[in-house]
Image (cartoon, grey):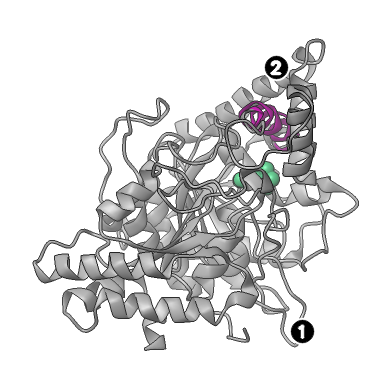
Amino acid sequence: MTDLTSLTIAEAREGLASKSFTSLELTDAHLAAIEAARSLNAFVLETPDKARDMARAVDARIAKGEGGPLAGIPLGIKDLFATRDVRTTACSKILGNFVPPYESTVTSQLWRDGAVMLGKLNNDEFAMGSSNETSCFGPVVNPWRREGSNTALVPGGSSGGSASAVAALLCMGATATDTGGSIRQPAAFTATVGVKPTYGRCSRWGIVAFASSLDQAGPIARTTRDAAILMRSMAGHDPKDTTSVDRAVPDYEAAIGKSVKGMKIGIPKEYRLDGMPAEIEKLWTEGAAWLKAAGAELVEVSLPHTKYALPAYYIVAPAEASSNLARYDGVRYGLRVPGRNIGELYEGTRAEGFGDEVRRRVMIGTYVLSAGYYDAYYLRAQKVRTLIKKDFEDCFARGVNAILTPATPSAAFGVGEKGGADPVEMYLNDIFTVTVNMAGLPGIAVPAGKDAQGLPLGLQLIGRPFDEETLFSLGEVVEQAAGRFTPTRWW
Ligand code: GLN
C-alpha cells in the first residue's frame, strides 16, 4: 500500500470518503514509510500506537458520517508544539523528557477536525537556525540530492523535519513555525509549500516560545490546496493567546483556482541583491511572467528599509528569546544539573542544557537589553521594525495585492557546509523572509523550479494582513505553471 503515501491530502480525503481505503490503512502506509526513512532523521519521536488508535477512532466516525475536514489524514507535528502526554522537547537538551499535560491550541484543532498524529518532527533547537543543524537530536537530511552526488544536504530550518518528512512522503502535511523564515525557507529547500500566516491568525498557545512578537504557526504541505486545507483547521481565535485575532476563518481552499486577473503584483527592487545567483534571478523573472500570463499586472515597488531587516531581526529576536528562555532554570522543567546553591543550579543547568546557537542568542539578547545598550540596540531595532512595516503599508496603499520575491538566496546546501566559522553566513539565509515577520504579514513559499544541479528553488508571495486567500490563489498559479517536484527515492 506504499502508493497511498503519494496522495495529496485532497486526494486522500476523497479516497477516505468513497471508502477506497481506511484511515488505518493510510496511517499504516505512512508508519512503514517513516520506519524505512530513519536515515533522514526527520522524526524525533514516532507515535505508532497513538496514530493507530486515532486512525481507528476516526474510521468509526467516518463510518457514521461524522468525520471532520481532516478526517483520517496522518500528519507530523513539529516538536515545538506541546502535545499532551507525548514528549515535547523543542529539540533542546534542556527540556529533557518533558511531557506536557496539555495540548497546543493549533494541534488540538487538527485533532478536533479528525487528523491523525504520526509523531514529533525534528527542528533547530528552540527553532533557532536555518538548517536544522542545531537540534540536540542531530541534523535532518534533505530527501533531495544534487544530481550525481551523494552529499547529504540540509532541508533548511528551523522546520527541517517538517519539510523533509512532507517531501519524502512520510506524512501528508506537517505543522511548522516561522519566526524569521522557518516555514518558507525549508519549504523552498524541499519543493514543498509553506505558509507563514499573518501574525495573530493562529494561536501561539502551547507552542514553545522563541520570539513571541514574531512567532507564527503554519502548515507545510505538498500542494497549495493541501496547505489551504490545513490552514483552515490551524487558524482561529483563541482567548488563551491575547495576540490571536478574533476574525472569522475563511474557507482558504475556495481561493484555489480563483482568477488573479487584474491583481497588482509588486516586484521590490531592493530584493535584487548584488551577487545573487543568476538562477534565482531567472526563477523570479519566470514567476513574474507566469502571474502576468494569468492576468495579473506587475509593478515595480520599493521597500527601502529592507537592508536593515536582517540586523534588526537579529536584535529583536534574540532579545525576546533571552527573556522567553529565562524560564529554563532547572527548577520547573526538564534537565536539572544540581549545584551547591541556586546560582550554581541555574548556571550548571543552562550551560549543560543549551546548545551553542541558543547560548549565543541568549547572550546577544541579554546584551542588547541591558541598561546602557538598550537605546542603542533594542530601541533602535524597534524603530527600524516600524519603518519596515511602513514600507509594506505604503506599497499596499498603492493598490498592490501581493509582492513576489525569491524565497531564498540559494538552493539547499550541504550538512556542515555553512555557518561553522561565521554564524552570520547562516543568518543570511533569511534575507528574503525576515521582513515579513518584522511586519507581521502573511507569506507563502511555493516550489517554482530547479537549479542547474537539480535542486528545488522556491518563490515567495507576501500578502496584505489577513489576506492569505490571495496568496493561495497566486501560489496555485505558480504551482500550475511550474509543475510539481518530487525527489527520487534513495533512502
Ligand atoms: N533562521 C532564523 C533564525 O535562526 C529564523 C528561525 C525561525 O523562523 N524560527 O532565527
**Residue 91 at least partly seen:** yes
**Residues at marks 2 and 1 touching, judged by CB atoms closer than 8 Å:** no
Check residue 341 for magenta coloring: no
Residue drawn at the location 62% of the way across and 69% of the way down: 41
Give whichever of 159, 26 is nearer the camera.
Answer: 26
- Range covered by the magenta-colored residues: 310-326
Q: Position of residue 472 (x, y in %)?
A: 39, 55
Q: Position of residue 386 (x, y in %)?
A: 60, 23
Give whichever of 46, 213 is nearer the camera.
Answer: 46
Height in image: 150 above or below 86?
below
Q: Amino acid at mark 1?
A: Ser
The residue that label 1 is drawn on is 149
**Lower sequence index among marks 2 and 1:** 1
Q: Amino acid at mark 2?
A: Leu
Check residue 323 for magenta coloring: yes
The residue that label 2 is drawn on is 379
Asked whether, in this view, residue 272 is left or right of residue 7, the answer is: right
Is the C terminus in the top left, top right, bottom left or bottom right quadrant? bottom right
Residue drawn at the location 81% of the way across and 64% of the way down: 416
Q: Position of residue 92 (x, y in %)?
A: 66, 48
SS for callout 1: loop
Say few, some or many: other residues with alpha carbon within 10 Å of mark 2 (under 14 / 14 to 19 / 20 or more): some
Height in image: 381 above or below 38?
above
